[in-house]
Image (cartoon, rainbow, N blue to C red):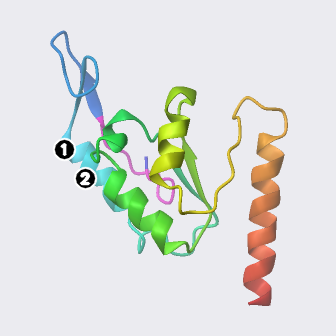
Amino acid sequence: MDMRNEARSPLAVRRDDPGDIGRFHFLEEGLSFGRRALDVAATEGADLVIVDEFGRLELASRGWRSAVDSLVHAGKRPLLIVVRREWAGEVQEVYADVPSRVLDAAGPDSVHEVISLLKYNRAARKIG
């Protein structure tokens, strides 16, 4: 879903035969839709860009990987990347040269930390 306009596109279908990830077969239509929603120009003016989720496809340089790489290296806005615990270390290695903060989504203070970061960035934009 593109949260700017609530447009939606199917991302994958589950079948009985082996797919891209387990039994999930990713649809090019959904992947293209997601890449367009995550484009640097498309996210201009966003207070926060959320990628849910960055996983095995992206670690194999597929899925949202190219769009996320562009957003990370553009560094124009806060980016929240949802990653399963088992892949967190690998994702940190991929973006080792980028300042980041790791939050546990189940942690009691994670939402407050995200809100604080957004307030800080908004204040910095007003000053700059």
Q: Is residue 121 visible?
A: yes
Residue reaching furthest to the top: 16
Q: Is residue 38 visible?
A: no
Residue type pointed to by label 1: Glu
Compared with 95, 92 (above or below) is above
Q: Nearer the viewer, residue 30 or 98?
A: 98
Residue name at image x 40 percent, y 66 percent: 70
What are the residue bounds of the magenta stretch? 2-11
Instruction: Check disc 1 and report the residue beneath it.
Output: 28
Instruction: Check disc 2 and report the residue beneath it.
Output: 32
- Give residue 89's position: percent from left, percent from top: 54, 38
Label 1 packing within 10 angstroms: few (<14), some (14-19), many (20+): few
Q: Quadrant of residue 16?
A: top left
Q: SS of the residue at dot 2?
A: helix
Image marks 2 and 1: residues in contact by CB distance under 8 Å: yes
- Give residue 43's position: percent from left, percent from top: 48, 68
- Give residue 112's position: percent from left, percent from top: 83, 47
Residue type pointed to by label 2: Ser
Q: Which quadrant is home to the C terminus?
A: bottom right
Residue name at image x 47 percent, y 58 percent: 5
Q: Disc 2 versus disc 1: distance between alpha carbons?
A: 6 Å
Q: SS of the residue at dot 1?
A: helix
Image position of 1 (left or right of 75): left
Q: Nearer the viewer, residue 98 or 48?
A: 98
Residue reaching furthest to the left: 17
